[in-house]
């Protein structure tokens, strides 16, 4: 296995092959226009007739903002040259080196088993180590703020941002996590069925589709960003989210005009949404003070 420098691992552009998804016809310039597009997404996912057993889950839509619309919809561990074989290596290294700096043991008092496995994996995700997890938010405006990041690289600033919208209930209809719950149930990641289907011991699981889960609220960022997650299966190669044959049933996107980044950022600031709210840390507060200039 070749040595990989994680710092050199960046988002990769999507293949030129057409996605099963129909591309949006408009680009968003204002928050008001963006919210109107969000309403259309809800109508697309939830506006038709709903089965009685899924009514309780209606209105659930998750959002993921990316600074470049051409970035692949893959988790970090699925981006070349990485693959799922690296997961156990990164997990082992992270466990051995991170404990002195944490001040706590993830999933204590469980040193092994599914509680420990997922807690460590989510902690790795939090600190930027490649995993099979993909971040989403339950808040559409949070995703927009991520997408229009004015501190993006020059290459990213030259591209239109995008907010991906996911119907997690429809996605999860492909799985049976618990017989007592209806199709589309969104489990907590620590439920046994999630580990059985998506844990590292199931690399023979014949599935290419990720599932939607709620993760542990083990850091302030997840809470502030209303973070939720999809887990990609322990398979290689991973299939890009938007390249799954049925992705049009549960996935769509909203393109943001790249020239509207600054004005959109100012609009969100008026509504009280800034990076300091999404990253509740001293460094974020310091950066916000410097940006204000007085």
Image (cartoon, grey):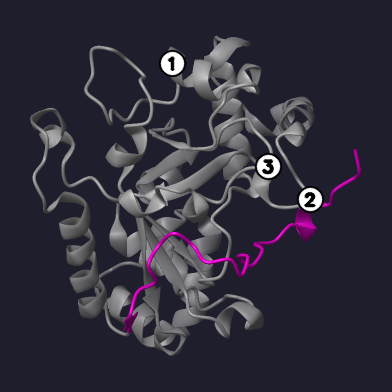
Q: Which mark is residue 81?
A: 2
Circle 1: element type: helix
Nearest the camera: 131 or 243? 243
Q: Which residue is mark 3?
A: 237
N-terminal label among 1 and 2:
2
Magenta-highlighted stretch: main secondary structure? loop
Q: Examine the image and state in which quarter residue 191 appears.
A: top left
Identify which residue is drawn at 52% across, 57% down. 282
Is there any visible trace of residue 37 in the rendered image? Answer: yes
Q: Which mark is residue 193?
A: 1
Nearest the camera: 233 or 9? 233
Q: Is residue 216 left or right of residue 92?
A: left
CA distance separating discs 2 and 3 = 10 Å
Reply yes or no: does residue 22 show up in magenta: yes
Q: Nearer the viewer, mark 2 or mark 3?
A: 3
CA distance separating discs 1 and 2 = 30 Å
Q: Name the spot of residue 249 as percent of width and height, x first.
A: 32, 50
Q: Residues within 10 Å of mark 2 (few under 14, many from 20)?
A: few
Identify which residue is drawn at 48% across, 80% down. 160
The correct choice, above or below, for 282 with respect to 168 in the image is below
Where does the magenta region start and end?
1-28
N-terminal label among 1 and 3:
1
Identify which residue is drawn at 48% across, 85% down. 293
N-terminal label among 2 and 3:
2
């Amino acid at each position: 296995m070749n040595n990989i420098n994680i710092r050199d691992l960046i988002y990769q552009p999507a293949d030129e092959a057409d996605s099963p998804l129909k591309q949006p016809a408009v680009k968003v310039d204002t928050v008001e226009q963006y919210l109107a597009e969000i309403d259309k997404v809800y109508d697309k996912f939830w506006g038709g007739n709903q089965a009685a057993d899924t009514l309780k889950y209606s209105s659930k839509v998750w959002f993921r903002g990316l600074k470049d619309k051409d970035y692949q919809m893959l988790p970090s561990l699925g981006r070349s040259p990485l693959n799922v074989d690296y997961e156990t290596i990164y997990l082992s290294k992270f466990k051995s080196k991170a404990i002195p700096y944490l001040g706590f043991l993830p999933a204590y008092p469980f040193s092994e088993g599914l509680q420990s496995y997922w807690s460590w994996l989510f902690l790795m995700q939090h600190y930027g180590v490649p995993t099979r997890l993909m971040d989403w938010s339950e808040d559409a405006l949070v995703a927009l703020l991520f997408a229009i990041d004015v501190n993006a690289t020059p290459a990213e600033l030259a591209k239109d941002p995008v907010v991906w919208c996911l119907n997690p209930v429809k996605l999860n209809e492909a799985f049976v996590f618990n017989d007592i719950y209806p199709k589309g149930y969104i489990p907590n990641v620590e439920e046994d069925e999630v580990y059985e289907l998506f844990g590292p011991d199931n690399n023979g699981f014949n599935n290419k589709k990720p599932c939607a889960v709620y993760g542990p609220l083990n850091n302030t960022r997840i809470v502030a960003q209303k973070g939720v997650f999809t887990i990609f299966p322990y398979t290689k190669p991973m299939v890009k989210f938007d390249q799954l044959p049925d992705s049009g049933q549960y996935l769509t996107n909203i393109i943001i005009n790249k020239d509207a980044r600054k004005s959109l950022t100012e609009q969100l600031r008026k509504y009280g949404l800034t990076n300091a709210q999404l990253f509740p840390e001293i460094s974020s507060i310091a950066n916000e003070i410097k940006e204000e200039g007085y």
